Each structure stands twice: as C-alpha cells, then as structure tokens.
Image (cartoon, rainbow, N blue to C red):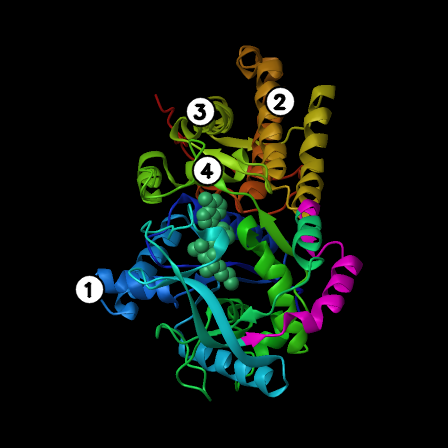
Amino acid sequence: MNKKTYYITTPIYYPSANFHIGHCYTTIIADSIARYKRLQGYDVCFQTGTDEHGQKIENKALEAGKTPKEYVDEIVDNAKDLWKSLNVKYDKFIRTTDKNHEETVQKIFVKLYEQGDIYKGEYKGLYCTPCESFWTEVQLVDGKCPDCGREVHEVKEEAYFLKLSNYQDRLVKYIEEHPEFIQPESRKNEMINNFIKPGLEDLCVSRTSFKWGIPVPFDNNHVVYVWLDALSNYITSLGYLSDDDSEFKKYWPADLHLVGKEIVRFHTIIWPIILMALDLPLPKQVFGHGWLVVNGGKISKSLGNYRDPREYIEKYGVDAVRYFVLREVSFGNDGNFSEEALISRTNSDLANNLGNLVNRTITMAKKYFSGHVSNKLVNEDIDIELIDSVNSLKKVVAQKMEILHISEAIEAIFETYRKCNKYIDETMPWALAKDENSNDRLQTVMYNLLESIRVCTNLLSPYLPDTSENIMSQLNINNNSFDFEKDNVYFVNDPEVLFKRIS
Ligand code: MSP
C-alpha cells in the first residue's frame, strides 16, 4: 500500500541579506513537524527555498558590485550551510531562479492571460528615484521614502494585473466552509474582515521599471512581479505543467504552508485565487505564526541586534537553539529571543532535567549492574504511575501536534522526564543497593528508568535529533517504539554529559 503523503513548506525567504534567527524559527518548526510526520510513517515532502527576484535584490547586488545572480548565489550557499548546522533536513530547496520554476511561471502567466484573469492596465505608485523603489502610502515614513528619507513622487507605469475581484465570493465561501484552512482562528477573522470584505483590489503582476525578474513571454518589457512568481514555487517545484508532474500528482495539495503573520494575507487571498484560476485544489492549511523578536524589538542590522545564528549554535549547541525556539514561544504568538533566556532554558530543562536524568540513570546502571539491566518485574504501585504516564505520552504528543501546539508537545515530553527524576528520588536506588535482598527490585527500578527514557527519547527525536541520537547510543538500544515494553535487555554504554550547565 502506498504511504500517506504529507507536504509541508516554509515561505521562500528573500536572499537580500544573510538569514537571522527569525528565519531559523519558521524553518526549525517546519523541520520538526516534517520529522514528526516521517516518524508517524508518512511519505513527507518538506520544502524550503529562496525568493530571488525583484528590485530590492537588484539594488543590493548593484551596491555590492555583483550581478544579481552572483549576489544571491552567495547568500543561498550561506543559507544552505545554516540549515545544515541547524540539522534541518529538507527534501526540496527551490530557488526562483531555477530554470524549471521560471519556465512554469511563464506558462502560468500565459494561461491566466489567455483565459482573461490577467489583463493589461496602468500601475500608479509612489516612487523614490535615488532608491529606484516603489512604495505604498502606508509604507512611507512621514510621507518620505522609508529607506533613505527623501521625497517620493507619483509615477505611472504600464503593468499587467490579476483580477482578484473575479474570485472574491468563491474565496469567502471557501474560507467559511473550511474552518481549518486559515489558522489560528484570529488570523482568519482578520483576513475576512480587514481585507476581503472591504473589496479586493486587482493585483499588479508585472513591472517594467526593473529587469531582475522572469520575463513576460509575450511582452518582453515586463518582468513578472513578486507574488505570482513567489507563490507559484509551491507547485513549480513539484513539476506542475512540466513533462514530469508525478510529484505534483503525489503531493499536491499541500498539507501545511507555514508562514509568518505578515504574509498570511498573500497565502490566504492571492494564492487561493491563483489556484482557483488554475482550477487546482487549495492547500489544506495555512498557519500564520507570530514573530520572534530580539530583546523586545524587530531583528535588524541597523538596530545592532542581528547576530549570525551560527554564533549561538557554536556557543550553546544546535539542540539548545532548537529547543529554545520550539519550547519558549507558544506557536502562533510573538515570542522574545534573548541569550539570557536561552541560557536559562538550557540550564533548567536540558542540563538539569534531561541531562541529569540520563547521566545519573546510566551511571547507576553501570555501577550496580555493570551496565547490564533486564526487567525483574518486582513492581510496586509507584512504578505503575510512571509506566502509565510513559505509555500515554505518544497520544498526548499526537494530540498537541495535530493542532500544532508544538511547545506543549515538548513540554509533555519534558514533564515525563521530570517524573522519571522524581521516581529516582522516591525509589532511592542507592538505598536499595545497600541491601542484597533488594537486588531484583533495584534492577526493576533501573529497567523502568531506562525504558521510560527510551520511549520519551524516541518521541523527542523530531525536535532534538542529535540529543536523541546521543541518548539512544548511551542506552545502546535500537528500538523505535513509543510503548513501554517489558522485555528489553540493556547493555548501556559509558555515560556522557549531554548539556553542560552554562554559567
Ligand atoms: N519572500 C517572501 C515570502 C514568499 S513565500 C511565497 C518573504 N520573505 S522574507 O525573507 O521576508 O521572509 C519571510 C518569512 O521569514 C516570514 O514570513 C517568517 O516566516 C520568517 N521570518 C522572518 N523574520 C522573522 C521573525 N523575526 N520571526 C519569525 N519569523 C520570521 O516574505
């Protein structure tokens, strides 16, 4: 039987500068969900990538004395290296400069033009000549260019437009009939009330004022303008309208587009309309998450709070960074990233709770049984309590992951590690070790601990893959089940410190 498929995407990021911890946030979350789904037996396609066209990149490249392609190539290499150091295991990395993407976007443009959804009109905008950039009224700061602070003036330019208004009623009906489509719920209401109901303005989909874009095939003065190019990535990468569209048939519609709250609008209004115009099914869900702010403010080079995420990885370890972003922020809301909070989380949860538990359990197994532990089944009531909570963990995690309450899923795992620590304090293996008659009870206690750690750690693997692998290799067992089993046999390896306390 064919496996069930699961297609999850991150936004494709602008390679206008190297990526910061905010980009890592979405990507780590997507990676953890993808890993979780793979563990559940799904055939997963996890896609990320880069959105490389547009005036801003053209200008940046010019400033750096490079061609736009040279400029983005460097940033893309840097991004791929960052994802590797964060243990992000994507299946596809799409670049909007990929040849097949460019060709398919052209086909989409022609198709929509021929069927009357795209028409030629006139674009009016506020233009800053020195920056060569268009701005909207709301983007201006004190009526001036937000980048350089100089005067802007109104210009007109021939452009193609996508008729969003044609699909307005169908879109509202779809959103209302599919409550799971836009999540969290608050974002859905915002879309309907603030954007759709007041009436949709047609979307400008081509420009003539810059060159760094995909040419409109039948009108070469024009290049395709950002969102049509960018949003199409989710299907061009799967071979839509190409000679081999087997992946498109297999994975589309996407199960989950993860996006930051500022681009929910494009993913829940423009993207569904493009898909409706192409007569394609809509993604099952768009989840708009909050922002990671740094010490309360937006991350930006000019505020001086931009740091290469690799600095944190080198200093504290990849799983300390992954754990922090996954656990600290309740998914959907904004959350604060600070080095102090990362240190405090690492110390309390990873070093004290998890690290200590694994270390003292393995050390005791070595000391009392030379590392060789099997289940002697000398159980007491206190064991049942622990075993029950270990056995119910997979269900709790599944329920939380189903609604993308990722931080709560992880919290449930760590709560069970905490219960194991409490179990040690209450059963006091060191006291049992003093009495030879308690030897079988002592071995049962050690077994219960090792087996509980094994189950929790299997469930932890999507979030902290390296740490899980390390624990499993200390336990020296190859068993991926999520159930407390009674008849495993352990020959544990020497203990290794998982996380050093950071002072
Ligand atoms: N290129 C568009 C997206 C096109 S998708 C078809 C774009 N790119 S972006 O580089 O600006 O990145 C946007 C995404 O990066 C956000 O939606 C979000 O997922 C992620 N983040 C960037 N900064 C972030 C934070 N400070 N916090 C959380 N996520 C952030 O928009």
Asked if residue 254 can be seen in this view, the reply is no
The answer for how far apart the CA atoms under marks 1 and 2 are is 74 Å
The answer for how far apart the CA atoms under marks 1 and 4 are is 32 Å
Q: Is mark 4 within 8 Å of ligand 1?
A: yes
Residue on which the image places disc 3: 344
Q: Earlier in the sequence, mark 4 or mark 3?
A: 4
Mark 1 Cα shell of 10 Å, populated few (<14), some (14-19), many (≥20): few
Placement of the N terminus among the 4 image quadrants: bottom right
Residue on which the image places disc 4: 293
Q: Earlier in the sequence, mark 3 or mark 2?
A: 3
Residue on which the image places disc 2: 440
Residue on which the image places disc 1: 65
Under mark 1, the amino acid is Gly
Q: Does residue 181 show up magenta in the picture?
A: yes
Please state which of the two labelled residues, at mark 3 or mark 1, is closer to the viewer: 1
Under mark 3, the amino acid is Ser
Q: Is residue 102 above or below residue 394?
A: below
Of residue 501 and residue 473, the one placed in the foreground of this image is 501
